[in-house]
Amino acid sequence: MPDKNFPSTDYPSDVHTIQFEDKTILLIGTAHISQESVELVEEVISNEQPDCVCLELDDKRFQALTQKKQWQSLDLKQIIKKKQLSTLMINLLMASYQKKLGGQLGVQPGAELLHAAKTAEKSDIPIALIDRDVRVTLRRAWKSTSFFKKGYLLTTIFASLFDSTEISEEKLAEMKQKDVLSELMEEMGSALPDVKRVLIDERDIYLCEKIKTTEGQHLVAVVGAGHVAGIKEVFKHDRSNELEEITTIPPVSGIWKAVGWSIPLLIIGSLITIGIQKGAADAGANLLYWILANGIPSAIGGILAFANPLTVVGAFVAAPITSLTPVIGAGYVAAFIQVMRTPPVVKEFETVGDDMGSLTGWWKNKLLRLFLVFLFTGLGSSVGTYIGGYEIITNLFS
């Protein structure tokens, strides 16, 4: 039976006591930007000396908090090769949003989680990282969102970065009771239910099921306040059978694969048909139009991003080719050339969160400029595909 002396004292309403089988769990709901949360987790862990401290972190985020120079292990070339640049950008955007809010409260985002780990370490208490891999979370959220709502999501986050309005004292007091991520989801309202489901609801299930399987009878679990209600509800049911599903990145549907390949096949087929019906000269003229229609907008995108000259040339060359295959886009090719020719320096990794908050910072910081290269050259190639494809199809039937 659980020890009735655990917890040993009464705590504020942010600390919830849960009985599950032979375990007693003290679930602490924190705000990731609150000094009060930092002090609370230290108090509870120091007083209770639990068998284990569960943290709302995965391995990647834990390393980011505990390793001051985690940028040293960030291999941008591998990130680009694995086509994870968009995931990295969204991750940095969310981190910058939290950092901005935390700056007004005088505490760094995630400070209470880091402090919980340090407090546990001082007493030789093991810790358990109970959150889902952040890469899985972000990629599931991205894949679950429609094209137009992706734009809405990015626009909302970007707008929050450039909003210089000071948060009122009342708003700060309210946010101390919430997880920042939940606050952002609430601001978006019902417009992004799929994103909310992945970022909050699925993680409630994952966090709860991981707490259930953590060794020890007396546990302290530190999670964002926005997860508390969901976790307490999941404790009433066995939802372990859902873990495999919510830790899997959904594959691209067969329909989208078919659409992705149909466009290049249509273009190539049209060029061949024009050659047969109207001669090689007409086919060559249409091919040249395709090259210029794709290459020029993509190169202009590189110029607008202040890309390295070789990156601009590479975007021009790559766009007509990558537009004929859904396997890789011109943005990734341009980004790879950019990181090889103009790699970010140490200082730019360290200041990326602050630089995101200013428009000029996106061009001055080489890491952020890499994202601009990726976005602008890819957008230019997409525009070129539409223009070039329309012209070729029109000529085919003219």
Image: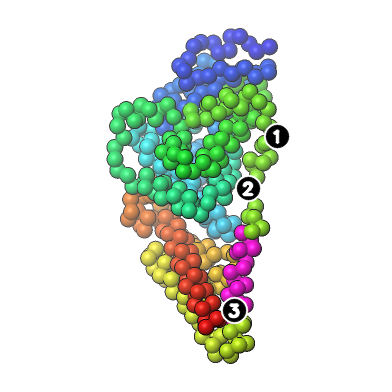
Q: Amino acid at mark 2?
A: Ile
From the image, give the main secondary structure of the stretch colored magenta.
helix
**Mark 1: which secondary structure?**
helix
Image quadrant holding the N terminus, namely top right
Going by the numbered disc 1, the residue's amino acid type is Asn
In the rendered image, which residue does mark 2 sit on? Answer: 249
Task: Look at the picture and state if 289 lies above or below 186.
Answer: below
**Residue that numbered label 3 is attached to:** 270
Q: Marks 2 and 3, how far apart in space?
A: 35 Å
Q: Residue at x 37, y 44 (%)?
A: 160
- Compare marks 1 and 3 and give the one earlier in the sequence: 1
Q: Nearer the viewer, mark 1 or mark 3?
A: 3
Tell me if 310 is positioned left or right of 251 in this view: left
Secondary structure, mark 3, is: helix
Between disc 2 and disc 3, the foreground one is: 3
| Quadrant of the image occupied by residue 128 | top right
For the magenta stretch, what is the residue range? 256-271
Compared with 199, 39 (above or below) is above
Query: Which residue position holds label 1?
Result: 241
Give the tally of numbered discs.
Answer: 3
Q: Residue at x 41, y 32 (%)?
A: 33
Q: Residue at x 62, y 24 (%)?
A: 235
From the top left corner, tell me how far across and down residue 361 is, in percent. 35, 53
